[in-house]
Amino acid sequence: MKKSKTSSIIGISSATFLSRILGLIREQIFAFLLGATNFADAFLVAFRIPNLLRDLFAEGALSTSFIPTFTQYVLKKGEKKAFYLSNLVINFLIMVIGFLIILGYIFTPQIVRFMAPGFSLFPEKFSLTIMMTKILLPFLLFVSLASVFMGMLNVYHKFFIPAFAPAMFNLTIILGGLIIFLISPSSHQKAVLWAMAAFVGGFIQLAIQIPSACRLGYKYKFCFDLKFKEEGLKRIFNLMLPAIIGLAAVQINIIINTMLASFLPTGSVSYLNYAFRLIQFPIGLFGVAIATVTTAYISRDIVKNDISQLNKNIADSLKLNSFLSFPALVYFFLLGQLIIELLFEHGQFKPRDTLFTYQTLQFYCLALFFYSGVKIMAPVFYAANKSHIAVISSISAVVTNLAVSLSTYRVMGVKGLALGLSCGSFVNFLVLSFNYTRHFGWIKDQNILSGIGKHALAAIVMGIAGLSLYQWLKGYKIIVSATGTIILCGGFYFFLNYLFKSAELEKFFRIIKSFIKKKK
């Protein structure tokens, strides 16, 4: 059960890397088939609801509340009692989410009108969004149950399969997209078939985790505790509501941005989606991996009341986050248009769409470090029963995003919406960091500021060199200039960190080397 923290991060990252590569291929196929059209906008709004719940549960509230409680049960009450608790949670979710799905079918038009009020001005787009929302509603149950199995496996330091499950989701949709391409239906039918593929992919993402949980000793049992007599169940759901609020800042901000974008010209919702998917690549590859492992370790630190080890884990995670997120931020901001042109500018996705997506990406990528940092910091407060702090920070982020977005979106368009989300993420991280220092003390003797400073300086110098390199490569085909700048900028960034004697660089390559040896 015991496993190196950084080794676990690399293990998750390897599985997540496959998932994110498949995710980019999925987005490429989506862009080729539907571009930034009314049909693309309609699907993205329809998928926003289950996607929101996935982010909140699979990488958020349920994991944040379930993992510390399940960990406590395993350590103090034994595995039999812990698995009984997991069955109580699973059955409760089936009942509650099932009821919400039924309500969703009844009130679908109202939900769509709330999510994208501007769509009601276009009857065809509005009705298509309603149809696809109904197809995707059961996805809510799949992702909710998947998050429970993910939590069980993570507590036992089985990180690979939960990280690999989204890869199966993406692969399913890719296969669906290839079938759509081969049968060449109308754009309306393409969007509906794409929604059906996402539905199937969600089920597979759940199913692939169940055998691993069973090998740990888990067996499903039909049991209920509607009166919340079980202490652990009561604690989980007492934590979940504030956790949803506390971790929902980015998701709520995305909903706000979607609502406002529905009033902007056709394609605006799609530009937000494509840009956000690009920043999700480094966040998912590194940020979520770091946060997932950190959550499992800090839960044990809190249970053992080991504040010194807690500070070390948080400091190590934040430094590793800066080491991995800063170069991505700088590259996206300065040279992101190359990536967008290479990945998406095919079929229905036009050069104009590339330009607007890149402008949106420039403002979105400013949140990279803070977005991942929130995922690292927020779980500390739930594990320590200080959920009100995370709630306050989340509300502050939502208010900030709303203020910035409302004041800029009519002038700046989708760029203003992306700027609002980045400002909200910054405020969220700032409030969490300030309160962490208040309650757990300053993270001492970890060289955190100097470590983050080295990574920031190396990323800036890398960016300047990358612009010069692009001037030399821009006469070549896009695949040469894009991949060339990525590879050479990455190599130069590692070289600079070597000169700066970055501890994260040494640790990164040491663990990768040991990880490769294990695979042989």
Image: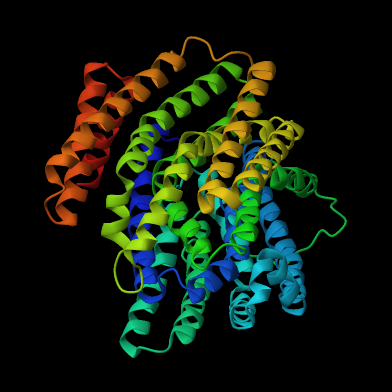
- Residue 144, by quadrant, is bottom right
Can residue 79 be seen at all in this image of the molecule? no
- Which residue of the protein is positioned furthest toward the top in this rendering? 445
- Residue 356, image x, y percentages: 42, 56
State the count of labels: 0
Residue 517's place in the image compared with 349, above or below, is: above
- 445 or 103: nearer the eye? 103
For the residue pair 36 and 180, the one nearer the viewer reads as 36
Q: Is residue 312 above or below residue 252?
A: above
| Residue 16 pos. (x, y %) | 38, 51
Q: Can you name the residue that lies furthest to the right here?
A: 227
| Residue at 70% over, 48% down | 244
Q: Is residue 423 above or below residue 37?
A: above
Report the side of 120 relative to 368 (left or right).
right
Residue 392, quarter of picture: top right
Q: Is residue 458 visible?
A: yes
Which residue lies at the image location 33% right of the left edge and 34% below the top edge? 327
Residue positioned 30% across, 60% down in the render: 343
